[in-house]
Image (cartoon, helix red, strand yellow):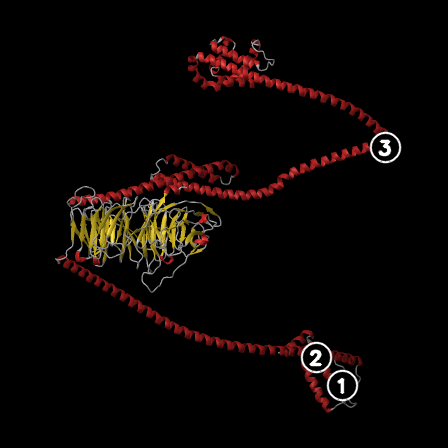
Amino acid sequence: MPESSLEFKDTGTGSVECRAAPVRQFSQSSLTLHRSSHMLNSFCTEHNVQECLSHINQEVSSLGLPPVWTESTGSTEINVVAVLNCMYDLIQLHRRGLRTLENMEAEQLKSSSNVDYLQITTTRLKEQLEQSRRENTAILERERQLQLKMKSLQNCLKNEKEEVQKLQNIIASRASQYNHEMKRKEREFNKLKERLNQLLVDKKEKKQAIDVLNNIGRADGKRSLWRTEKTEAKHEGEMYKTLLSDYDARQKELLLENAELNKVLQQMKKDIVTILSARKPTLKRSEQQDNCIQQADSEEEDEVFDSTKEGVDQYCVHAREKLTHSIRLQWRKLKRHVERLDSQASLAQMDDTKATDAVPREIHEEEMERLREEIQQCKDFIHTQQQLLHQQLSSPCDEETASLLSDCYMLQEKESLREEWATLEEQRKIFERERRNFTEAAIRLSHERKAFEDDRAMWLKHQFLNMSPFSDSKKPHMSKSKSACLLSETKATAASAQRKLIKCPSETSSSSPRFIPHKSKSTADLYHTLCLIPENSSTKPKKKTERFVESSISLNGNAQVQRHDSDD
Amino acid sequence: MLIFHKGGNKEQNYISQKAKNTSTSTKIVKEQLYYMMNFSEVFKQSNQLCKVSPDGKYLATCVQYRLVVRDVSTLQILQLYTCLDQISHMEWSSDSLFILCAMYKRGIVQVWSLEQPDWHCKIDEGSIGLLSSRWSPDGRHILNTTEFHLRITVWSLCTKAVSYIKYPKVCQKGIDFSRDGCYMALAERRDCKDYVSVFVCDDWHLLRHFETETQDLAGLEWSPNGCVLAVWDSCLEYKVLTYSLDGRLLSIYSAYEWSLGVKSVTWSPSSQFLAIGSYDEKVRILNHITWKKMAQFEHLATINNPKAVVYKEVERRPAVGSDDLSLHNITIGATLFNTQSQYEICPPPVHIPVVKPDPERANPKIGVSALAFSSDSRYLATKNDNMSSAVWVWDMQKMTLEAVLEQTSAVRCFQWDPRHPRLALCTGNTKLYLWSPAGCVSVQVPTEGGFQVQSLNWHCSGDSLILLSKEQLCLCYMDSDQEDK
C-alpha cells in the first residue's frame, strides 16, 4: 500500500515521459552496479571508446535523450554540445531522481508512522473487542440466568394460579356447601320451631294466658269491626290515599320549585336581554363585519320577546321548551358578546397605544408652533427692554437727583395718604358706632314688636272666643289649602303691601317704618276677616281675599303669612 | 315515704362558650351564651328503665320490681306499682294511659293503668318464653316475641283476643311501625328467603306481603311520612332497598361490593334523606326523588376543612382552672375529685385518635354505627366506631362538616333535642355535653358521689333531659328564658 501511494504521488509531480523512467532506471542502475563490480574505475579506456560511445549512446537513447554521437558521421569526434546537453539532461534527471527519492523517503516515514499508529489503534480496538466480547458473554450468561428465573417464576405463577383456582373452587364449594348446610339447618330449625310450637300448643299445664280485670275500650272509642271484604277494600283505599297524598305533596313541592326556577330563568333572560339591547347601538356603530350575525341576533331577539309574552303559562311544556331555548340562545349571544368585548378591549388597547402617538402629534405640532411664537415674542420683548435700558443708561442723567425727586414725590404722597387714612378710620369708627346704635334700636324694636304681637294675639284670642262657632267651621278647610295659597300670596302681596303702607300709617307709633306695612297689612286683613267684609275685593285678586279669609283665622297661619311677607 | 322535691338541690351553671370560628381559625368571635341549668335530686333506678310518657306529663321509673310514676313538673310520686319480679322492660302506651312492664325471665308482662290504679292485666307467655314485648301504636295491643323468634303473639286488651304472627325474622330490626301508627312492617324468613309483611295495625289485616331482594335482611324502617320502607341487607353485603307502601320496589342502592357493608340506617324527619352509615367509615345520603346518592360524608382521621369547627374537650384540675372563669364552666359545689373540662377550638388540621380494629374478631369496631338527624333535619350527628371519642355534626343544607366534638373518653350516647337543633351527649363520666350551632358546653352534674352519665333522654318538650347513670337518674332542666340572654 505505501508503495502505490508513493507512485501515485510521483506521477502527480513528474511528466508523462518520466513515468516509465524509474523502472528502467532501476534496472539500469542494477545493471551498472553489476557491471561496476567487474570493472571498477575503468569504464572507458582508450580502447573501447567506440564501444563506450555506442554504449552511452544506447544508454542515452534508451533514456529518451538525443544521441550524443551519430554513427553516420563516422568520426570519433563527439559532438561536445550534444554531450554537454546530454550531461545536463542526465544531471537534471539525476536531481529529479534524488528529489523523488527524498519525497519517497518522507512518504515512507510518514507511512511508517501511520502504520505504527494504525497498529496501535488496531491493538486497542482488538482489546476493546475482546472486552466487549467478554461483556457480551457475561450479559448472555445473565440473560440466560434471568430466563431461567423467569421460567421458574412462571412456573410458580402457574402453580399459584392453580392454587388460587383450587382455593376459589374450594371456597365456592364451601360456600355452596355452607349455604346448603345453612338452608338445611334453617329448615331443621323451622321444623323444630314448628314442632316446638305444636308441643307448646298441645301442652296443657302451663299455657299462655291473659288475665285482665276488665276489658278496656279502644283508643278511638269505636268498636272493632268484623273483618270483611269491605274492610279489606277500605284498607287498600286508605293505603292508596296516603300514597296519593304523599305524591300530591311531593308534586306540589316540585311545582313550587319549578316555578321558582322558572322565575329565576325569566329574570335571567330579562337581564340578558337588557344587557344585550343596551350594547346594541354601540355595536352597530362599531361593527360592520358582524352585520349578518347581528341581523340574525335581532331576529332571535324578536322571537325571544314574543316568547316572553306567550310565557304566561309557565307550566306548559311548550312554553318551557321555548323558554329554555331562548335562554340558551341569549346565553350564547351573551357569551359571544363578552368574547367580542374581550377582543375589542384588546384591540382598544392596541389602538390606545397608537392613538397616544397619532392624536397628540398634531396638537403637539400646534403647541410647538405656539410655543415657538411665544418664545419669539418673549425674545422681542426682551430685546426691546434691553434696548430701552440701554437708551436710559446711555442718556446722561444723574441718578441721585432723580432718586431724590422720586422720594420727594413719594413722601408727599405718603403723607397725604396717611391723612386720608386717618380720616377714613375716624369715619369708620363713627359708622361703627352708628351701626351699633341701629342694631340696638332694631333689637329693641323687635322686642317691642313681639310684645305688641302678643298683645294682639291675646286680643284676637279674646275676639275669637267670642265668635268661635263661625271660625270652627272654617278651620279644617284652611289647613288644607294653606300651603298652596301661601306661595301665591308671597308673589302677589308686593304691591298690596305698598298700598297699605300708604293706607294706614296712623296706626303705628314706631319710628322704624320697615316692619309696619306687613303688620298693618295683616291687621287690616284681620279687620276684614273679623268684619267679614270683602271690601277690597275690587282692587285685589279674588283668590287673595279668599286666602285671607281662610288663613287669618288661625294665629299660626297668620304668623306664617307674616313671615313670608317679611321675606319679601 | 318516697317523696322528693324538685329543686331540693338546685344548682346553677353559668356557662359561657366560644361560639363561632371563622375560616381563618386565628380569629375567634366570642359569643357568650348563658344557659341556666337546674339539676334535680337523684333518684334510684334499675336496668336504665326510665321513660317519660308520650304526652310529657309523667315519668316512669323502675326500681327492681317496683314501678314508680312521677309528675314530671313536681317529681312527686303519683303512683307506685309492684310487679311480680324484677322488671326487664318498661314502655308507655301511646296515649300515656298504660304502662307495660315485661319480666322476660318469667315470661310475664304486666300492664298498669294510670287512671285506674286498681286495674291490672297480666299476660303469661307460659313455657314458650318471652324475648321482647312492645305496645302496638294504638296502645290497646301488646306484641310479644317468643323465644327463638318462634312467633309474635298479639294480645288485645280490648277483647283478650290472641293472634299469632309466624316466621318473624331474627334480625337487628325486624319490626317497625309507621310514625302515624297505621302500618307495621315485619321482616319474615320463609324457605330461606326474606319477606316483608305489611300489616294494618287497626285490625292486624295483612296488607302486603312481598319477597325482598336481600341475601340476609338485617333491618327495615319506615320513612317518617309512612310511605317508603327502607330495607337493608346484613353487613356481609352492602345493599339498601326502598319499597313503596304498596310493596313496589323503588330502588336498590349498593355503594360497593365484597367488603363489610351497612352498619346503620336512618331517615331524616322530613323523609327527604336516607342516611346510610357503613363499615367503610362513610355516610351516604340518598335523596327521596331519585333514590340516588347525593352526598357522602367521610370520617377522616385528619380534619383539614377550615370551615368545620373542632371542639376538643380539655380536662383540667379545678385548682388550675380557676384563673380563667369566663371561658369555662363554674360548677358551684362540684366535688373536689372531679376534674373540670372545657372545650377548646382547635385550628385545622386536627388529628382524631383512631383505634385500629382487630381483624380477627367478628363485628369489628369500625364504621359508622350511630346516625341521628336533628328535629329540623338541618344537622346530622354521626359516630364512627374506630374514633369513638368523636361526634361529627354535618350540615345538611351545605352538605359539609359543621363541627366535630372530640371528647376525652368514648362517647356513650348522643341525642338531639326534639324541638331545637341541640345535641346532648355523654361519655360515661360525670359531665353532660351540649352542642348547638352557637357553641359547645360541658356541664358537671352537681351531685355528691359523682353521677356517671351512661345515657340520656330528652323530654319531648326539649326543656329537660333525663340523665341515667348505672343505678340512678337525674333530671336536668334548661331554662329557655335564660337562653336568649
The quadrant of the image that shows the C terminus of chain A is: top right
Instruction: Determine whether the residue tagged by mark 1 lies in a helix, strand or loop.
Output: helix
Residue where numbered disc 3 is placed: A394
| Residue type, label 2 | Leu
**Residue A464 vertical position relative to residue B43 in the rendered view, above or below:** above
Q: Quadrant of residue A230?
A: top left
Q: Quadrant of residue A4?
A: bottom right
Kindly report the distance in space between the C-alpha atoms of the residues bearing marks 1 and 3. 128 Å
The answer to which of A345 and B101 lies nearer the viewer is: B101
Instruction: Determine whether the residue tagged by mark 3 lies in a helix, strand or loop.
Output: helix
| Mark 3 chain | A
| Residue type, label 1 | Leu
Kindly report the distance in space between the C-alpha atoms of the residues bearing marks 3 and 2. 109 Å
Residue where numbered disc 2 is placed: A101
Q: Is residue A118 left or right of residue A205?
A: right
Mark with earlier residue (2, 1): 1
Mark with earlier residue (3, 2): 2
Q: Position of residue B381 (x, y in %)?
A: 36, 51
Q: Position of residue A316 (x, y in %)?
A: 33, 38
Residue where numbered disc 1 is placed: A53
The quadrant of the image that shows the N terminus of chain A is: bottom right
Instruction: Determine whether the residue tagged by mark 2 lies in a helix, strand or loop.
Output: helix
- Foreground: disc 3 or disc 2: 3
The answer to which of A421 and B199 lies nearer the viewer is: A421
Crowd band around label 3 with a 10 angstrom C-alpha radius: few (<14), some (14–19), many (20+): few
- Is residue A568 visible from the viewing direction of this image? no
Please tell me if label 3 and label 2 are on a single chain.
yes
| Residue type, label 3 | Ser
Mark with earlier residue (1, 3): 1
